Image (tube, rainbow, N blue to C red):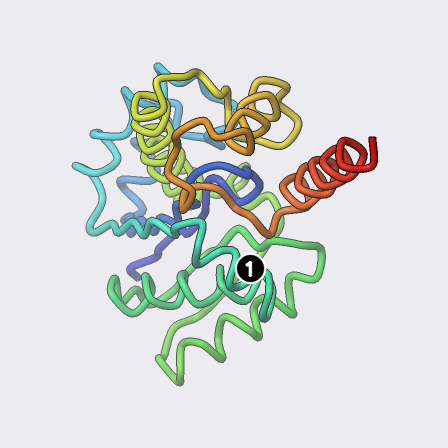
Amino acid sequence: MPTAGLDEAGRGPVIGPMVVAGVVLTSSAVRKLRAMGVRDSKLLTPEKREKLEPVIKEMADAYSLTVVEPRRIDEAVSRNGLNILEAEVMAGIIEELKPSMVIVDAPGRNTERFKRVLKSKLKGIPVRVRAENKADSRFVHVAAASILAKVERDRKVAELREKAGYDFGSGYPGDPRTKEFLLKVLDGYPFPKDQIRWKWATMQNLLDERRRIDLTDFLE
């Protein structure tokens, strides 16, 4: 039975896209990839992920990646929420890959709710859906997808760093280098504004902080 694993990388950063990947694997490929060390991408070094990526693509019956740009993420946050967007993107990948069964790494604790939302986006396509938290640590199908998504996301971020001419770190809100860079952008440093998630609390807080500083300077 063709089974696909789906996962994302870059859901939380304030800079750069999110990447969602789907991988269809046979049971034989699952055994071989497990033996080769395929597991949750967060537990692997960047070098190991880079080494495994072409192997996964070669051994997969099919795979697909979708790059979700920050502007689309901001729109989703303003409208329905990121979980809905993730379900929509995953549904598109499932429609493309046409597996009989999918295992998805579900965001949030309510896995059954995410499963219902995902199935509603599939519009009656006959596929069995299994949604679980931490599925990337339990299923090779999902771990393989997490590796493809993470490697692609890392490449996109590396391109942005090169374009910026500045090492802004990981792009995650908790990274001091990322926050320092965002402050520079607000001060006029040249960087593609459409690669920043302006609806993130991080950016809203920085903008509020800048407004307070500007107001204080005006009053003085």
Q: Position of residue 25 (x, y in %)?
A: 29, 48
Q: Position of residue 10 (x, y in %)?
A: 48, 40
Seen from the viewer's position, the closer of residues 212 and 168 is 212
Residue at 39% over, 18% down: 46
Q: Position of 145 compared to 87: left or right? A: left
Q: Position of 184 compared to 216: left or right? A: left
Q: Position of residue 53 (x, y in %)?
A: 27, 30
Residue at 53% over, 45% down: 11
Assign the N terminus to one quadrant of the image.
Answer: bottom left
Compared to 6, does 120 lie above or below?
below
Seen from the viewer's position, the closer of residues 68 and 152 is 68
Residue 186 placement: quadrant? top right
User: Given the image, on which type of amino acid does mark 1 rest?
Assistant: Ala
Q: Position of 103 compared to 152: left or right? A: right
Residue at 22% over, 29% down: 55
Residue at 73% over, 43% down: 208
Dot 1: what SS?
A: strand
Q: Position of 156 compared to 143: left or right? A: left
Q: Residue furthest bottom?
A: 124
Seen from the viewer's position, the closer of residues 106 and 132 is 106
Q: Which residue is mark 1?
A: 131
Compared to 65, does 82 lie above or below?
below
Q: Position of residue 200 (x, y in %)?
A: 62, 47
Assign the C terminus to one quadrant of the image.
Answer: top right
Seen from the viewer's position, the closer of residues 79 and 64 is 79
